[in-house]
Amino acid sequence: MKYGTALRDDVANEQITPLIGVYDMFSASVAAQHYSGMFISGFGFAASHYGLPDIGFIAWPDVVSFVQRLRLAFPGQHLLVDIDDGYVDPEVACHVVAQLEMVGASGVILEDQRRPRRCGHVDGKRILPLEDYLDKLDLVLSTRRDLLVVARTDATEESEILRRAAALAETDADVLLVDGVRSVERIAQVREVIGDKPLLFNQIAGGKSPRLSLPELQELGVDVAIYSTPCLFAAQAAMDGALRALRDDDGRLPEVSAGHVGVAESLALLERNISRNHPRTVELPV
């Protein structure tokens, strides 16, 4: 299956394409019940795999391994992968792109940050000279066969954002992302500058960008919306609440009722990851 083509076709549709950030196989299992596409975010992966902030700790073999496991369990999902700056060197970026395409990724996002990098929605970001980033992007584009490529700029000054957006729109990248965009007006400016190039908008709770609905984004000309951390942040809040309740009730587990999950509910979720690849559902013992 051409996963890049499938995502590219969805992006070309009139309806905006939402992709939900997942951080491990379990969060992906939950997300697959509600959405047809996933985003493997650097923030979520750094937090779940290493217990560290998203400031450049991620090793590319770990990402490739994760995407391979995702594709096996979710053969029909779009899988867009954040590869940061391509792990520094252009040669490494191309190698990672080839590896990810081989294991079934649908697309990648390549940013123009320089090390030490930062999450796109925090202060202190520094960016590569535009020419250096364009050279890296061109190499990645020449390496991919079908993979969708998102060109991302982390520029923060208005003139530089628009200069880079215009330059990226002239490349063969499939989609463009200005990360950490701070206003509706700025989205409209970018949309005007890039012409017909598909536009991606990244939302993260508590981040720099405005909270907008999918209809609002579509009205602004956005084609793809990624939600970096809804699963991660919800899990943090829910786990903290559950453990506080367990402690406060002297270690007594809650009844399995509305709002609570038990063994049967969790197994039913996980069994779907087997049945998607096999004609018969495997019955697991409880």
Image (cartoon, rainbow, N blue to C red):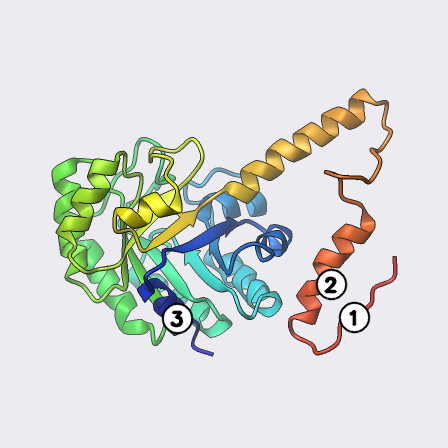
Quarter of image, res 213: top left
The mark that comes first in sequence, 2 or 3, is 3
Which residue type does callout 3 highlight?
Gly
Locate the C terminus by quadrant. bottom right
Residue 7 horizontal/vertical position (percent): 40, 67
Residue 264 horizontal/vertical position (percent): 81, 53
> Which residue has dot 1 on it?
282
Residue at screen point 62% across, 52% down: 30
> Which residue has dot 3 on it?
4
Which residue type does callout 2 highlight?
Glu
For mark 1, does the 10 Å Cα neighbourhood hold few (<14), some (14 to 19), or many (20 or more) residues? Answer: few
Residues marked 2 and 3 touching at CB (< 8 Å): no
Q: Is residue 88 among the parts visible in the rendering?
A: no
- Residue occupying the far top of the picture: 248
Against 124, is 189 above or below? below
For mark 2, does the 10 Å Cα neighbourhood hold few (<14), some (14 to 19), or many (20 or more) residues? Answer: some
Residue 178 is left or right of residue 81, and the answer is left
Residue 5 horizontal/vertical position (percent): 37, 73
Residue 216 is left or right of residue 251, and the answer is left
Against 38, is 274 above or below? below
Q: Looking at the picture, tell me which residue is in the foreground, 259 or 114.
A: 259
> Which residue has dot 2 on it?
271
In what element is the residue under mark 1?
loop
Q: Which mark is residue 166?
A: none
Quarter of image, res 181: top left
Residue 215 is left or right of residue 258, and the answer is left
Residues marked 1 and 2 touching at CB (< 8 Å): yes
Q: CA distance from mark 1 to mark 3?
A: 30 Å
Q: CA distance from mark 2 to mark 3?
A: 27 Å
In what element is the residue under mark 3?
helix
